[in-house]
Amino acid sequence: MGTYIARRLLWVPFLLVITSFVTFALGRFGPGDPVEILLGQHFNEEVAQRIRAQQGLDDDIVTQYTRYLWNVAHGDFGESYQYRGRSVTELLQKRIWVSAQLNFAALIISVTLGIAAGLFAALRQGTWWDSATVAFTLVGQSMHVFLTIPIALLIFSLKLDLLPSHGWEGFFSTHIILPALVLGIPGVAIVTRLTRASTLDVVGQDYIRTARAKGLPERLVRARHILRNALIPVVTTLGFSLAGLASGSFIVELYFGIPGVGLLTIESLFARDYPIIMAVTLLGTTLFVLANLLVDLIYPVLDPRIRLGGDYVAG
């Protein structure tokens, strides 16, 4: 296992270099001058040239990129263009924790409700319960956050006055309920469909019939044999689901006024604050790779016949 993990981690630097260079080049050659945006209506060419010289923006792209990689390797992501005098690391530290809590709450909703609904529908295949569950989850998946956020705010905040409409007070406050629901509900539909399809496939296997023929209680058959094997395809999608949650949280944080990485990223995009954009890109890529590695490590726990490295041993 150690060799497999080390081999996977060795690819991370190469992936980060490729991703960072593409983002860096787009930032340098793309439209919009961050210095002009920074100065706004007080733009002065002499002042702009001085700022470019201070930031090293007047060097060629190879020099700029090499210097950037060297600084990042030493833990320095640079200084924000928008928030002068403040480092990117300082700006991201507290916001990362806020976004992590929001995405974790949404993931809990997606996984727990999705697995429960998928098992419920599969074990009642052919009944109206099955059709109703699938139809309900498809409706949730088809509704984008641009639509669900106003509806949720209208019902739960404006009409019923049950939940706060904006702000952030931590993981265990009521402020997280609406954002987490809006962010997690689309994932419920995906997990439900995968769990249902996987469960129906597992239920028809010989070892399930053998377990029941031996007289095992149905509760144990479902928990030990059906659920564990049905979760393998679901776990596969968790790494990709994390990426989807991260992109969706940008919009959710903006609407609900949550001071997370998503809100900071949107502000940085409009301000052409490239140091923050670069840091967020590298952070997202790293988390995506590590999440997929974690998913691979979960496989042998669910099914001991699976070996890390891609081998599958028949039982």
Image (cartoon, helix red, strand yellow):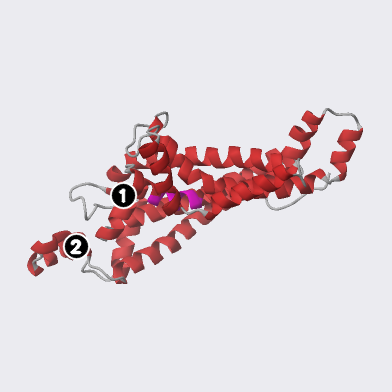
Q: Residues within 10 Å of mark 2 (few under 14, many from 20)?
A: some
Question: Seen in the image, is 273 located left or right of residue 250?
Answer: left
Report helix, strand or loop for mark 1.
helix
Quadrant showing the C terminus: top right
Q: Amino acid at mark 1?
A: Leu
Residue 187: image x %, image y %?
55, 47
* Magenta stretch in the rendered image: 243-251
Q: Which residue is mark 2?
A: 37
Decide: is 152 above or below 213: below
Residue 270: image x %, image y %?
27, 59
Name the residue nearer the viewer: 13 or 81: 81
Q: Residue at x 28, y 48 (%)?
A: 88
Was residue 248 drawn as part of the magenta stretch in this picture? yes
Residue 252: image x %, image y %?
39, 47
Was residue 5 drawn as part of the magenta stretch in this picture? no
Q: Which residue is mark 1?
A: 264
Q: Amino acid at mark 2?
A: Ile
Q: Is residue 33 visible?
A: yes
